[in-house]
Image (cartoon, helix red, strand yellow):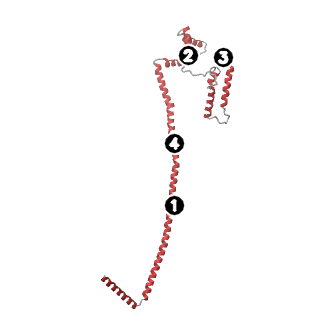
Amino acid sequence: MLSAFKAVAFRPVIHGNNKVVSAVAMRMMASTAAVTKVPFVGEKPPTREERIEQWDYVNSIFYGPERDTKNFPILKQPDRAESVRLGVFPARWFDLLYPKTGVSGPYVFLGGFALWMMSKEIMVIDHYFWEFPSFWIMIYILCKHPKIGPQARKYLEDKMKFEEFKYFTRPINRWKDAANAEIAKNERLIEETETSKHMYLAKKEGIQLQLEAAYRQRLQNAFQEVKKRLDFEVEKVSLKRKYEQEHMVNWIVSSVTKSITPQQEKESIKSCIDSLKRLSAKAAAV
């Protein structure tokens, strides 16, 4: 942008319009200084977003509607380069000399100009002089020779492609593959770290279940111990009652037995036999 500004804004200097140039330059420098802040020593430099914003603001002023495009037109890059002769000289120079010197005139002029420079020792012939003509001869062979040029270009292009693949494309692909593998590894680690909270919850629930099982086991043990003690008390009371009952029955039976005389025993036996006879007679009559 600065080069375009120089090429457009300072063009009127050639024509003597210095006031217009000064006005445009002051306007551009003021608008640029308004948004471009040079950081001091130790100050944090502007971020990428701030630089983009500054660049957009300056472009909006430089290419804005206030610019006088009639006197200061915006330069554009030509679509294609101008045709040349001998690789470097514009063809219009040769076309300008053709009506006066003929077709061979420009070439004779170049040769004579080279001889004049060598005669005046402006162009000195030393050990490195032959690099210059040999370079242009090789350029001519590569660009103009019908047989050697295409083959040499193909060889050089293949060699350049191989060198580019060897020293640029292949290392970058390796770095990309390594970076992609590292990214995949880190993504897998991120996924593993994301599952850690679920594992924590599962372990927490497992521990809570273990604590609940241990608590229920302790309750069951306490219940069994209390039940054993209660059963022991019940069995002890039942045994005591049974022992007292048996003792009471035996004491009553022994007391009654001792109180019965032999005569009472005979009478009771006789009454029992009579009762049995009556019962048998009733049963036979029925």
Residue type for callout 4: Glu
When the figure is inspected, residue 172 is found, relative to residue 224, above or below; the finding is above
Looking at the image, which residue is at 56% across and 16% down?
Answer: 89
Q: Distance between the residues labelled 3 and 2?
A: 28 Å
Mark 2 surroundings: few (<14), some (14-19) or many (≥20) residues within 10 A = few
In this orientation, which residue lies closer to the viewer: 60 or 105? 60
Question: Disc 4 designates what residue?
Answer: 187
Mark 4 against mark 3, which lies toward the viewer? 3
Q: How far apart are marks 3 and 1 (CA)?
A: 103 Å
Mark sitting earlier along the chain (2/1): 2
Q: Viewed as shown, does residue 278 lie left or right of 171?
A: left
View extreme (bottom): residue? 263
Question: Disc 2 designates what residue?
Answer: 89
Mark sitting earlier along the chain (4/3): 3
Query: What mark, if any, has residue 215 been given in the picture?
Result: 1
Residue type for callout 3: His
When the figure is inspected, residue 271 is found, relative to residue 10, above or below; the finding is below
Mark sitting earlier along the chain (3/1): 3
Q: How far apart are marks 4 and 3 (CA)?
A: 65 Å
